[in-house]
Amino acid sequence: MKSSKEIFEILKDEFGDKILELKEDIPVDPYIIVTPDSTEKIARFLHDSSDLQFDSLMVLSGVDDNNPVKTKNEDGTESLSGGTLSVYYHLYSIPLNHKIVIRAVTEKENPMVQSVESVWKTADWHEREAFDMVGIRFENHPDLTRILLPYDWDESSFPLRKDYKNPEFYQGMKIPY
Amino acid sequence: MSIKTEHMVLNMGPQHPSTHGVLRLELELNGELIVNVKPHIGYLHRCFEKHAEAMTYPQIIPYTDRIDYLASISNNFGYAVTVEKLMGIQVPERVEYIRVIFGELQRIASHLVAIGTYGLDIGAFTPFLYCFRDREKILSLFEMTCGARLLYNYIWVGGLSHDIHPEFVRLTREFLNYFRPQVEEVNQLLSYNKIFIERTANIGILPAETAINFGMTGPNLRGSGVKFDLRRNDPYSIYDRFDFDIPVGDGRMGTVGDCWDRYFVRVLEIEQSIRIIEQALDQIPEGDVSSAIPKRIKPPVGSVYGRVENPRGELGYFLISDGGLNPFRLKVRGPSFVSLSVMGELCKGHLIADVIAILGSIDIVLGEVDR
Amino acid sequence: MGILDKEFSDSNIIITNFDNLMNWARLSSLWQLGFGLACCAIEMMATSASHYDFDRFGVIPRNTPRQADIIIISGTVTLKMALRIKRLYEQIADPKYIISMGSCSNCGGPYWEHGYHVLKGVDRVIPVDVYVPGCPPRPEALLEGLLKLQEKIRNESSVKKTA
């Protein structure tokens, strides 16, 4: 059983600047922030390393961090742009009984995170859901299509983004009450 | 001479009596053999996570009921445990005991539906009627306490909506005494039925390693022989005080991890739940059930992942709070959602008729798959 | 009530009018499309099971729309599902009846405000005969809804348009 601090040290030794930060100051679960372009390698290491043995991915969640940058337009109005999306990986090791949370932060403009589907097969559907709901694209995912919403849902509309606007109609059916 | 052959694609669902709701399976067939199964889900996507972001913490509880409508209490339980973990609330002893009793009664009720409908899928109608008869008795115990038959809104953050009825303990004991022999009846009707064994043993074998890699939990994982139960391995509430066994699949009728094992783990779990309820009924203390309910639920900034053992497996809530009155993000990890993703792997090489047996054995609830 | 107007003494022949006979036949064996959507489907199952016994009203689950008479829309209708429900409805031979069971299929239920993927009432895609309120309705409520539907069928006429 290892604490988050120890896991962070192990990862830092192995991957160096790909591991950004250990966030411990807010309750309850501490998490490790990593860069989105190396999640597959990190996941592979977490899964295979004999000290860690994270054999189960409990949940993978896509989150809109809701931190857009305000910019003043020439005519005095404000417009929001930028911001980040995050992917949280909750890992658990059944043999060693320890947990860790990994967070990968990516730009909202072109959200791209490496897929961990090759490490944990369960990530397949979780990643599709994160794509469907928040619009995060996963590199090397075998079949990144919508999963819960219909396949012909508006391509740029992701319901769990904080700036989501509900469409009026879908296939001739009125959506609002 | 070679004959040109090609695979046939067969559509199953969303309206199909054995898909346990609105699930569509796209079956790719080579003659009678399954080449691939692709589940299409989302026909019951009710936007729970969006609702959670717009509601205050107590308002979310009725929505959690509707995620997995066969195990509402367990969903309330998981949500309450998660929020309490973030807020650091210690709930009174009596509340913990009542929660455990209800959680286990709910597990029995849910497993009865799983067993009954599994028989129905395979072609045995009678066990369904027997199981629903006994389930009604559990529902009337719930109804007596909180007035609802199916969706209870009973476990609140920090407490319960009502105390139990004064007669509840006596009637529950009465029910348990009545119910214990009925489990044997289910075994005689279904578990050791020759036809049932022929249909389920050695079908849909799920090796332990694959099961863990696919994130399977609950009876599906234990059916593969892995002794892992959150009530024991990562105890929440007061489960560490009770004495109970964790049944695992042993390949008695075929191979470890086949449909029969997954099914039979549920039957054995019913017996263990009875044991837990009996112990809890003996130990339940007096006290107030609403003293720890906060006036205003406003957790601090932070994130938490809480998980409980739902009848179908690990039910997790990932909650991010920004310090406001509604959650910033509430993601639900539904055990059925994860279990269903293994369908393609399990069905390969089996016959069409086995798809039904396999789907029934992983016991999904579509409300939880789609949320 | 009943179809009997006149009975001859040797009790082999009864005289009634055509409408009464047809309506009686229709309302006494309403085969239901075996089709559950959400939470209410569990209550619908409980209604069909041993305790409440839907069979005594002639309601038997039939798994193909071509041989069914009523659909009980038992649960939340999502946008993805709505078109499938419409198609199922179109596949049922006339006369066909719809019971909308539960708040969700009546009007969207608890999902009326933020449900971006929920159809706010199944009557936006298919016509409904009887609405059963509740979230979920108790089996007794569903039985009452069925009795209401039977009453409606009893008063139908083959020449006059009803609705």
Image (cartoon, coloured by chain):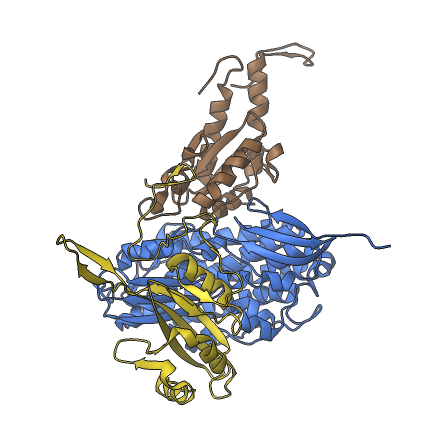
Q: Nearer the viewer, residue C83 or C75?
A: C83
Tell me, yes or no, if residue B22 can be seen here: yes
Residue C17 position, x and y percent, is 57, 11
Q: Position of residue B125 (x, y in %)?
A: 64, 48
Residue at the extreme right: B1
Q: In front here: C121 or B120? A: C121
Rendering quarter of residue B358? bottom right
Q: In the picture provided, is C120 more to the left or to the right than C47? A: left
Q: Residue at the location (57% across, 61% down)? A: B362
Q: Nearer the viewer, residue A132 or B216?
A: A132
Give residue C10's quadrant in the image: top right
- Residue B293 relative to residue B259: left or right: left
Q: Is residue B5 left or right of residue C53?
A: right
Can you say which quadrant of the picture contains the C terminus of chain B? bottom left
Q: Would you identify the image quadrant in which residue C127 lies?
A: top left
Q: What is the tally of numbered marks visible in this picture?
A: 0
Question: Where is residue C143 drawn, in percent x and y?
Answer: 48, 36
Look at the image and give the colour of chain B.
blue
Residue A80 position, x and y percent, is 23, 58
Q: Is residue B43 above or below residue C25?
A: below
**Residue B281 showing in the rendered view:** no
Q: Which chain is brown?
A: C
Which hue is chain A drawn in?
yellow
Q: Is residue B88 above or below residue B67?
A: below
Quadrant of image for the N terminus of chain B: bottom right
